[in-house]
């Protein structure tokens, strides 16, 4: 009997679908089909490729509500977030479509001829996605890769294959060539690994845990296969005494509770200057306690369940009984529920303070001065995102430059826009996605010299 993936509704624990898991042979066959589709796609006129991607975007737009409902069902995302995620796929496709005709090489002055560069597609791209933002993260790879003339095989996470499968259907309905975008739900150590090891997969775009990312990178190294890694995070939210403390406190809860904390950019280390620490905590605690946790399909819900029992066990293991914590409320009963939680008074080197919990848990730690804030902010192996709150422009710039992270925001928690670059320092990743250079990451540069003296 072939292997199957059981998809659960995280809010109830009930099975909502069973999806066949791709085997290594399935991956082989998909790569063969993708290789043929890619050749035709790359040879098509740029304007035609752009038009088809815009049609794909329009198809996603027309099905936003359906895709969002599916995301609520399989991932437990709040309906508001899920609508944003579907719309984000549409925007990523539109943005990438705008790049097709602008993906140009250069002409470089040389003696005795002319020198030109071509940005050639790589071929078949393997996109390996996590479960925390199944649609947007898949599209971060799919949209620019297709726009640059590649074919894509997407392996969604085991727990969240449904929206990915629906997106592939919409691509076909929109007129994208058959086999150009294939979705292969499957297990990481079979379908995922087969993509990584396949000699005809030209690049891997991996988003997931740092542990798995290292294994993927090591295997890619064997074949000198390019790889983009978007990995974990433990991002600081630094609140200086000169900041608008009320505004900083008001923004803090959803900066780590959005998506139930299952966000690689979650601001889970709240670093507060000692002179305002108690006042900040007095403002923050009731806000965390008041977050509305419940049925993700309810429009009023701010936070839904965790993705799985395994994730719930993991989060519980970090908030040990010896820690002082402020807790919000979460439903009892079936489903994978954990309350919004603020840990205070933890040792700055404790696991909860430096490791990625990937749940609705933040630590609040005091600091003394700017140098101390930067030292604490950088005291993890991660470097994905971070925020700082201050009214001092010079400090905002100094600290932004001093924190070793790929995405910083000042007096805000924004991290990800499809038109600005995104990626991690240190063990948070390798390479950049999104932004104006997104398509270039899916090309190889070829330099050609043509003699004018022959
Ligand atoms: P994971 O590493 O367990 O799985 C990610 C994907 O890799 C899944 O599709 C999985 O099936 C696949 N996989 C597992 N083993 C594999 C193998 N040996 N070879 C190839 N593929 C394999 O991570 P997860 O638990 O699904 O996702 C959560 C993690 O993702 C968190 O650590 C989070 O921070 C990270 N994340 C990072 C970003 C970012 O942009 N930096 C964004 C979202 C999530």
Image (cartoon, grey):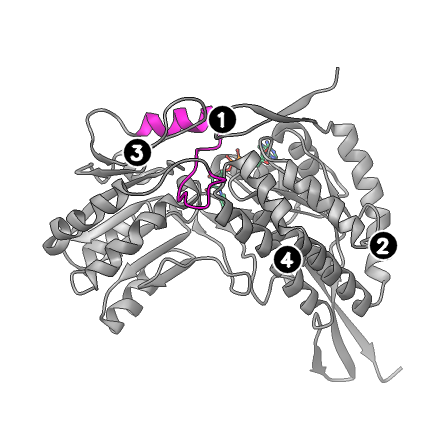
Determine whether the residue tagged by mark 3 lies in a helix, strand or loop: loop
Residue 402: image quadrant is bottom left
440 to 107, vertically: above or below: above
Left or right: residue 383 versus residue 221 is: left
325 to 264, vertically: above or below: above
Nearer the observer: mark 2 or 1; the answer is 1
Q: Residue furthest top?
A: 1
Left or right: residue 346 versus residue 168 is: left
- On the image, numbered disc 2 is attached to which residue? 39
How many numbered dots are placed on residues in this image?
Answer: 4
Residue 41: image quadrant is bottom right
Q: Residue furthest right?
A: 454
User: Which range is magenta?
Assistant: 296-318
- On the image, numbered disc 1 is attached to which residue? 12
Residue 201 visible from this viewpoint: no
The first of marks 4 and 2 along the sequence is 2
- Tell whether label 1 touches label 2 (CB within 8 Å): no
Circle number at residue 329:
3
- On the image, numbered disc 4 is attached to which residue? 90
């Amino acid at each position: 009997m072939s292997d199957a993936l059981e998809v659960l509704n995280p809010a109830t624990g009930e099975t909502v679908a069973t999806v066949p898991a791709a085997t290594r042979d399935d991956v082989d066959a998909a790569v063969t089909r993708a290789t043929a589709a890619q050749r035709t796609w790359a040879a098509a006129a740029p304007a035609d490729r752009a038009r088809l991607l815009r049609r794909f975007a329009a198809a996603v737009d027309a099905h936003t509500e359906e895709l969002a409902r599916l995301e609520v069902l399989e991932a437990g995302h709040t309906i508001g977030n899920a609508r944003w995620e579907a719309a984000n796929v549409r925007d990523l496709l539109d943005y990438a479509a705008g790049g097709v005709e602008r993906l140009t090489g250069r002409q470089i002055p040389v003696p005795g001829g002319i020198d030109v560069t071509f940005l050639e597609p790589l071929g078949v791209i393997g996109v390996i996605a996590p479960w925390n933002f199944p649609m947007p993260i898949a599209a971060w790879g799919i949209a620019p890769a297709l726009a640059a003339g590649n074919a894509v095989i997407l392996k969604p996470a085991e727990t969240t294959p449904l929206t990915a499968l629906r997106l592939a259907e919409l691509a076909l309905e929109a007129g994208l060539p058959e086999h150009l975008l294939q979705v292969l739900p499957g297990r990481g150590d079979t379908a995922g690994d087969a993509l990584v090891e396949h000699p005809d997969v030209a690049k891997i775009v991996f988003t997931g845990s740092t542990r798995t990312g290292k294994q993927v990178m090591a295997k890619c190294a064997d074949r000198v296969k390019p790889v983009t890694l978007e990995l974990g995070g433990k991002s600081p939210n630094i609140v200086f005494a000169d900041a608008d403390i009320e505004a900083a406190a008001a923004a803090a809860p959803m900066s780590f509770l959005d998506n139930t904390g299952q966000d690689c950019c979650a601001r889970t280390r709240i670093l507060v200057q000692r002179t305002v620490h108690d006042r900040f905590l007095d403002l923050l605690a009731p806000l965390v306690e008041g977050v509305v946790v419940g049925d993700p399909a309810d429009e009023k819900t701010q936070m839904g369940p965790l993705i799985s029992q395994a994730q719930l066990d993991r989060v519980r293991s970090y908030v040990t009984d010896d820690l002082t914590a402020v807790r919000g409320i979460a439903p009892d009963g079936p489903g994978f529920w954990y309350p919004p939680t603020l840990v205070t008074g933890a040792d700055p080197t404790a696991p909860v303070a430096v490791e990625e919990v990937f749940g609705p848990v933040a630590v609040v730690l005091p600091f003394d001065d700017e140098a101390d804030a930067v030292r604490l902010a950088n005291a993890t192996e991660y470097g994905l995102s971070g925020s700082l709150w201050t009214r001092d422009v010079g400090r905002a710039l100094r600290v932004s430059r001093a924190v070793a992270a790929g995405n910083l925001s000042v007096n805000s928690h924004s991290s990800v826009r499809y038109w600005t670059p995104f990626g991690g320092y240190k063990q948070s990743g390798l390479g950049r996605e999104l932004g104006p250079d997104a398509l270039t990451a899916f090309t190889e540069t070829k330099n050609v010299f043509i003699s004018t003296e022959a």
